Image (cartoon, grey):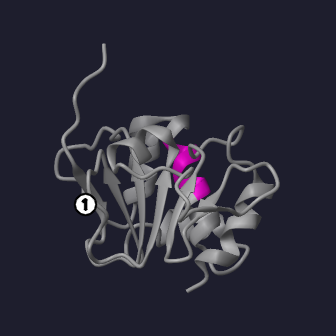
Amino acid sequence: MSKSVSSMLIGNADAQTCYYLPNAPTLPQGWSYRQEDATATLIALNGNHWRKILTIMAKLSSLDADWKNYRDTQLLKDDEQIMIAASELSLTAKRHIIVGAESAAKLNIHYTSTSFNSLDEQDKLHGNGSGVFISPYLDYRQFPNSLIEQLKPYLNK
């Protein structure tokens, strides 16, 4: 049974990078993105699915090769936010990564629009030149490391 999700923000409200996802993780009572073990708690409660999502976010956001440490200590604390079921783009972010067709449809953004160009050979990543990107869902099968490496240069801060 599918449950309706109202718009939700996870992470720093002033972050420069926003990831738009269709479904929210389960959040424990009193959870805060600021707590030291914030991502570990999300992974423990939500399992492998959210571990994959947070890992791909960390690989895209980390400035060096130590994405695991970034995921476990910094992700969502300073420069990333997740908007769940958003119908409008974040007002604070400069980089918008719209994850999957469901998120794009909710935002009424279509990669087939003339304002979006393909950024990869497989036609899976699209950008409009103004910091808005449409990507596959954050899963290793749909968003492998090769695709992460192709999108990452566009996200450099």
Question: Residue 145 location, x and y as percent?
Answer: 76, 55
Which quarter of the rendered picture does the C terminus lie within? bottom right
Is residue 78 highlighted in magenta? no
Q: Main secondary structure of the magenta part?
A: helix
The residue under the point 37% across, 72% down is 77
Q: Residues within 10 Å of mark 1 (few under 14, many from 20)?
A: some
Residue 153, how many percent across, how many down?
69, 77
Q: Secondary structure at mark 1?
A: loop
Write the residue at 69% across / 42% down.
140
Residue 51 falls inside the magenta stretch: yes
149 or 36, nearer to the observer: 149
Residue 156 picture location, percent across and down: 61, 82
Q: According to the image, label 1 marks what residue?
A: 32
The residue at the point 40 percent across, 67 percent down is 76
Q: Amino acid at mark 1?
A: Ser
From this view, report whether residue 151 is shown above or below residue 144: below
Q: Point out the residue furthest to the top here.
A: 1
Horizontal side, residue 35 vs residue 29: left or right: right
Residue 114 lies in what quarter of the image? bottom right
Question: Which contiguous range is marked in magenta?
Answer: 50-56
In the image: residue 108, left or right of residue 75: left
In which quadrant will I find the N terminus?
Answer: top left
Is 27 displayed left or right of 154 in the figure? left
